[in-house]
Amino acid sequence: SQVQITCLPSSQIQGIVFEPPRILLSQIKVGQIENIRFRLLGKRADSGMLTMLANAENLKASEVIRIAPQIKIESFGPVSPVVIQGTESRVECLVKNSGNAFLIKPQAAFEVNGKEAKVSLPCIPPGDSAVLSATLNPATETLQSKISVELTSQNCGGTLNHESSVTV
């Protein structure tokens, strides 16, 4: 029998086009597995659901696929664990988008001894990583200065926090 497969986006996902809009498979036997491929065109910036529908005569099946960015801190800390008082020091945060939608405007707020530096990027594509970094200048000498990062993005709910330390 012939099977028609279509892909429908939820109303939350805007500007997405599927190529082809539907796939027709003929001569499918019971228990047979057939690989198919849709191209998802457009910028995946919104979270939502895709519903795959398969219809064959009086049989129907569906599968829901969630589309969303997923923000993750891969690593965070000073480039050098020891810095000289009054000299510049770099702090880096490696951010990964392990989701399947673009991560829009990720922002890192770095803090050392009450001084804050904010850095952002336009976006991180699905599956990619990027480094957000800032230059900080510790003014006081301490055995261990706490450094922290607060990570947010425009389209991924919540905040990620991470701490490390540097010797000044």
Image: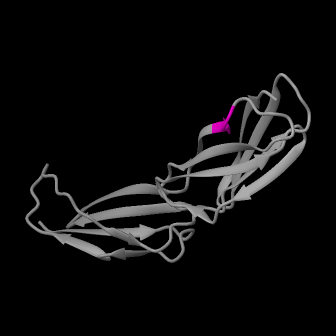
Q: What stretch is highlighted in magenta?
A: 76-80
Residue 118, position as x, y percentages in the image: 78, 54
- In the rendered structure, the answer to whether residue 72 lies left or right of residue 114 reads left
Q: Image quarter for residue 8?
A: bottom left
- The count of marks equals 0
- Which sits in the foreground, 140 or 60? 140
Query: In the rendering, at what x and y percent does residue 12 appear?
Result: 57, 68
User: Looking at the figure, which quarter contains the C terminus?
Assistant: top right
Q: Is residue 17 above or below residue 84?
A: below
Query: Above or below — where is 138 with respect to 29?
Result: above
Q: In this view, does 127 lie to the left or right of 135?
A: left
Indicate left or right for 43 with 156 as reference.
left
Q: Nearer the viewer, residue 15 or 166?
A: 166
Q: Where is residue 127 in the image (x, y as percent from the top left)?
A: 46, 53
Colour logic = one colour
Q: Is the magenta stretch mostly helix, strand or loop?
A: strand
Kindly identify the residue that appears in the image at 85 percent across and 35 percent down. 85
Question: In the image, is residue 82 part of the stretch drawn in magenta?
Answer: no
Indicate left or right for 96 with 121 as reference. Answer: left
Q: Decide which of 37, 1 is in the foreground and name it.
A: 37
Image quadrant for the N terminus?
A: bottom left
Residue located at (16% from left, 52% from top): 33
Q: Which residue is drawn at 51% across and 67% down?
A: 44
- The residue most toward the top is 143
Q: In this rendering, is residue 124 above or below 82?
A: below
| Front position in the image: 78 or 8 | 78
In the image, what residue occupies the spot 50% across and 60% down? 125
Q: In this view, does 78 lie above or below 116?
A: above
